[in-house]
Image (spheres, rainbow, N blue to C red):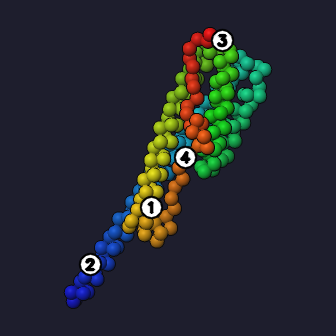
Amino acid sequence: MSLTGWILLSLALLLAGALIYYYNRFVQASHEVKAAWSDIAVQLKRRHDLLPKLVEAVRAYTAYEQATLLAVTRSRDLLESLTPGEVAEGETGVTREVRTLLALAEAYPELKASDRFLQLMQVLSDVEQHIQYARRYYNGCVRELNVLRESVPANLVAALFRIPGAVYFELPLASEGQSPALDFGASS
């Protein structure tokens, strides 16, 4: 084989190696995004499973506040039928309803003193923190995939294999992403 043949073979092997390397990085990054989304889904499921218990605890003290309680339940049920791309917007509604529920609880000092209510509030606080951490991790994985997808020479591999980018978990309003305020203190 001539020198030119060796050079062309070396270049072809180098190109094939780079193609395999970057494709495998995309596979890894895509699976990290899927795993991170799964973490968010688990935490949202925990929150959604907790909401009926919280509603029942509040309902025992606030029989005439049915509109708020129904809105929380409706928001929770609606989210179970959404696709991952619609979840962020739907979660905005759930967060808003949870805040309304917590504001309602402020009006009932005997509810705030209930052991069951306090336990549920502690669990809700824990779940909200886990959701926040899961969102951050997911968005970090999305950022890593999207940066890889747009960087040279990986962008050539992404275009060749039509590898899509991922969508960040963003909320329409930044304030909606904050955990609901949980006040365990005595009312004034």
- In the image shown, does 25 or 165 lie closer to the viewer? 165
Q: Amino acid at mark 1?
A: Arg
* SS category of the residue bearing label 1: helix
Q: Are marks 1 and 4 in contact (CB under 8 Å)?
A: no
Instruction: Give the number of the disc on residue 160.
Output: none
Quadrant of residue 60 in the image?
Answer: top right
Q: CA distance from mark 1 to mark 3?
A: 55 Å
Vertical arrangement, residue 55 with respect to residue 136, above or below: above
Q: Position of residue 161 (x, y in %)?
A: 47, 69
Q: Amino acid at mark 2?
A: Ser
Vertical arrangement, residue 145 with respect to residue 67, above or below: below
User: Is disc 4 surrounded by few (<14), some (14 to 19) or many (20+) residues within 10 Å?
Assistant: some
Vertical arrangement, residue 75 with respect to residue 187, above or below: below
- In the image shown, does 41 or 160 lie closer to the viewer? 160
Q: Residue at x 57, y 19 (%)?
A: 183
Q: Amino acid at mark 3?
A: Glu
Earlier residue among tags 1 and 4 = 1
Q: Label 3 belongs to which residue? A: 110
Q: How many marks?
A: 4
Q: Position of residue 185 (x, y in %)?
A: 56, 14
Q: Label 4 belongs to which residue? A: 169
Q: Is residue 77 left or right of residue 163?
A: right
Q: Residue at x 48, y 46 (%)?
A: 138
Q: Viewer-nearest of labels 4 and 2?
A: 4
Q: CA distance from mark 1 to mark 4?
A: 18 Å
Q: Is residue 69 left or right of residue 137?
A: right
Earlier residue among tags 2 and 1 = 2
Q: Is residue 75 left or right of residue 186?
A: right
Q: Label 1 belongs to which residue? A: 149
Quadrant of residue 110 in the image?
Answer: top right
